[in-house]
Amino acid sequence: MKKTTHLPALSVIVPVKNEADNVASLVGEIAATLTGAFQFEIIYVNDGSTDKTLQNLKDLRETVPELRIFTHVESRGQSAAVHTGVQQAKHDWIAVLDGDGQNDPADLHTLWNWITAQETTHCMAIGRRTKRQDDGMRKFASRCAADARRWLLKDGVPDSGCGIKILHRETFLSLPYFDHMHRFMPTLMARIGAKVASIPVAHRSRTQGVSKYGTLDRALVGVVDILGVLWLKKRYKIREIIEE
């Protein structure tokens, strides 16, 4: 009798907008690193792309049966794309990767090792980019924003903007949803008493396409977002419940 292997199940969600030149290589990497270690699906959420992103994804389904594709007819932003992917996911555990190829899918194994060591699903592992491969201005702006978030939100996470993370689907869906919420997931998780681990990961240079974010517009929006998250934090009390 053939022995049945029970592999852990993972839904990998990748939000993309105009990343036509990156989808093939990243889908291939995800499939290669997870095959044999997980039951998995790869969910790409095409957030209103105007290039060949959607067509290139459809072509990939011929060789990668684990690939599923959902499209926003109009761009709704990265948080909306992640939220759509989580809603459509079939598995209880979800991983999120940026679609620009700067996250290394191989790091999912490191994050998963931490997840499996926990005795709860009320947890999240997020990457911490130790050698960030961006230009000087982006790194400076990101560092300033991160310092402001840590000082105001006190979530203890040094790199809350890192795109690679793993958490439980049900826990994610219990978080308040709003535009740009993907930048504050560690804070939102800590707000409900969940365990959050910041784990060193690789960060690669973007080789194709261009960033969808400007330095100034991200900074201005970030100020409003931080104030909103502060408001949320102050209006939530962790409840300890004992069944008698």
Image (cartoon, rainbow, N blue to C red):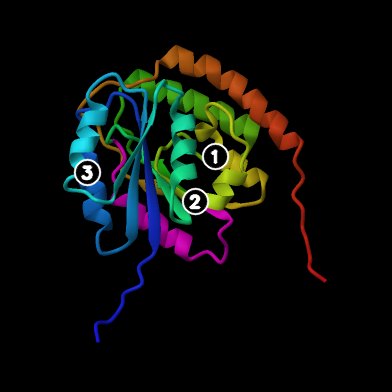
Q: Regarding mark 3 in the picture, which secondary structure is present there?
A: loop
> Mark 2 or 3, which is nearer the eye?
3
Residue situated furthest top in the rendering: 216
Query: Tag 3 or tag 2, which sits nearer the N-term?
Result: 3
Image quadrant in which you'd find residue 25: top left
- Callout 3: 10 Å neighbours few (<14), some, many (20+)? some
Are discs 1 and 2 less than 8 Å apart at CB?
Answer: yes
Q: Position of residue 171 (x, y in %)?
A: 58, 50
Name the one closer to the observer, 107 or 4. Answer: 4
Q: Which residues are magenta?
A: 102-124
Image quadrant in which you'd find residue 189: top right
Task: Quickly name the residue at label 2.
Answer: 167
Up the image or down, 148 lies above or below 41; here it is above
Q: Position of residue 55 (x, y in %)?
A: 22, 30
Residue type indicated by callout 1: Met
Residue type indicated by callout 3: Arg
Task: Quickly name the residue at label 3.
Answer: 61
Q: Residue at x 46, y 34 (%)?
A: 161
Q: Is residue 93 left or right of residue 102?
A: right
Q: Residue at x 74, y 49 (%)?
A: 238
Query: Tag 1 or tag 3, which sits nearer the N-term?
Result: 3
Q: Residue at x 42, y 16 (%)?
A: 215
Task: Quickly name the residue at label 1.
Answer: 185
Name the one closer to the observer, 231 or 47. Answer: 47
C-alpha gap between disc 1 and disc 2: 10 Å
Q: Regarding mark 2 in the picture, which secondary structure is present there?
A: strand
Residue type indicated by callout 2: Leu
Q: Is residue 234 left or right of residue 156?
A: right
Name the one closer to the observer, 80 or 208. Answer: 80
- Callout 1: 10 Å neighbours few (<14), some, many (20+)? many
> Mark 3 or 1, which is nearer the eye?
3
